[in-house]
Each structure stands twice: as C-alpha cells, then as structure tokens.
C-alpha cells in the first residue's frame, strides 16, 4: 500500500512510513480535488529522508535520519548499486530512488573514510550509532566492497509530496482550464510544483503563500 495521500498513479514499491505530523493524510489535496482543482507537476516526487528500517517516533525525525548517502556505497536488496548519479545536497533524490527499489529498502555500506566524514554537526559514525539496523557487512546476502566496516538498512520516511494543488501567483487554486476555483486558496505542502525535480522548504511555501492567500482572500 502507498503512503496515505500518495497519488494512485505512482505508488512507491512499498508503503512508506510517515515522517510528519500524524494528521498529514492528504485531506487538503482531496478537498481541493473535490472542488475541481487541478494537480501540479511533481506528483511522482516527495520530500523525505532515508531512515533506519525500524520504528521511529516524532522525536527521532532528525536524530535518526541517515543523511550521508553521498559517502556510502548504496545497494538494493538484490545487491545492485542502483544510484549512479551524484547525490544532491538534500539527498531527497536518493530517498525517492530508494522508494522505487524492491520493498522500498536499501543498504548504505560504509568504510572508515566514510564514517569519518561530517554532515552538519555530526560525523557519519555518530549518525550510524543511532541506527538500530546497523549491521556487519559480512552478514549481508551479497558481496560488499573491500574495506566495508558497517552497513545500515534504510527505507524512506515521507514528509510531503512535491506535487499538490495547482495555484497561481496569488495563491488561487486553479482548475484544469487554468481558471480559479472560486473562494479556494492554498499554501504550504498542499501546493505543488514549486520545487519539482529538487527540494525547497515546505515551511517557506507555507509562510510565503499563506500570507499571499490571506491577502488575496480579502481583496
């Protein structure tokens, strides 16, 4: 099953866990569609983080994020290295790629040099230390690179889709014919297409378009 609110046209390979508040269930999107709203580009993309393949709560959203894929060798469950591009600064592209792999899982395999790298205020080794799925690479069911010291099984946690309701510059929600849906405005993660092909802050979209929507509704 796809994550709640995931567009039926492009489900991930397995259900993704929610890395957001528990009421982020696509209600705003469904309400807009019921009023005749159009969808934006980017409905096949999401913002999320690769997390250890274990249970986590809200308090773990940041501390357990495995945000070091750029330093790892990345394998799916079949032992295939499936991500050949350079990993972006946000690693959002990598999270989306993992979601397409068998069972939406991957292994991050790290050597000593990778473990010594730093991401923001932590070393990779410190991030691995809080991952319950860290394992001896020798235990993996496929050959690992020489010098591998640790492997972490990850799966993506989804925060919000990149796609959403289509709006204009005044935050009016638009129909397929580009006309506005009367009296309907949107902001934040309910809005789509702002960062298609990449990632831009959902909080920034809420701040900017929330104010514009309020002003437009009073015009």
Image (tube, helix red, strand yellow):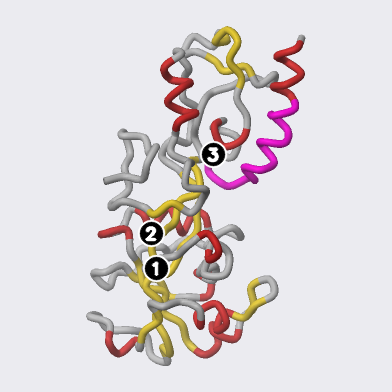
Mark 1–mark 2 distance (CA, rounded to whole Å): 8 Å
**Residue occupying image coordinates x 53% and y 75%:** 71
> Is 122 in the magenta?
no
Residue at image position (73%, 15%) is 216
Residue 166, quarter of picture: top right
* Residue 98 - label: 2
- Location of residue 34 with respect to 94 vertically, above or below: above
Of the residues tagged 3 and 1, which is closer to the observer?
1
Which stretch appears magenta?
A: 196-211
Whether the residues at callouts 3 and 1 have beta carbons within 8 Å, the answer is no
Q: Position of residue 95 (x, y in %)?
A: 45, 57
Q: Secondary structure at mark 1?
A: strand
Left or right of residue 165, residue 134 in this image: left
| Mark 2 → mark 3, Cα distance in angstroms | 18 Å
Query: Residue 93 at what x, y percent from top left?
Result: 49, 54
**Disc with the residue nearer the chain's start (2 vs 3):** 2
From the viewer's perspective, is residue 13 above or below residue 215? below
Q: Name the residue tied to disc 3.
A: 196
Label 3 and label 1: CA atoms lie apart by 24 Å
Residue 175 percent location from the top left of the image? 50, 13
Identify which residue is drawn at 48% across, 36% down: 42
- The residue that disc 1 covers is 154
């Amino acid at each position: 099953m796809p994550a709640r609110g995931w567009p039926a046209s492009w489900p991930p390979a397995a259900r993704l866990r929610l890395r957001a508040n528990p009421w982020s269930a696509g209600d705003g999107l469904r309400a807009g569609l019921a009023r005749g709203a159009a969808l934006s580009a980017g409905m096949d993309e999401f913002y999320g983080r690769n997390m250890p393949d274990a249970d986590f709560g809200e308090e773990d959203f940041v501390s357990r994020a495995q945000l070091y894929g750029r330093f790892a060798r990345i394998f799916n469950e079949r032992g295939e290295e499936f991500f050949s591009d350079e990993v972006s600064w946000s690693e959002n592209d990598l999270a989306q790629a993992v979601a397409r792999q068998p069972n939406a899982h991957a292994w991050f395999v790290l050597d000593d040099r990778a473990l010594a790298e730093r991401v923001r205020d932590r070393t990779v080794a410190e991030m691995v230390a809080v991952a319950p799925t860290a394992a001896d690479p020798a235990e993996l069911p496929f050959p690992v690179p020489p010098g591998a010291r640790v492997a972490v099984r990850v799966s993506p946690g989804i925060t919000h889709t990149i796609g959403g309701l289509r709006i204009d510059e005044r935050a009016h929600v638009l129909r397929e014919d580009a006309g506005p849906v009367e009296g309907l405005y949107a902001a934040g993660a309910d809005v789509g297409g702002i960062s298609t092909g990449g990632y831009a802050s959902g909080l920034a979209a809420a701040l900017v378009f929330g104010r514009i929507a309020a002003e437009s509704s009073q015009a």
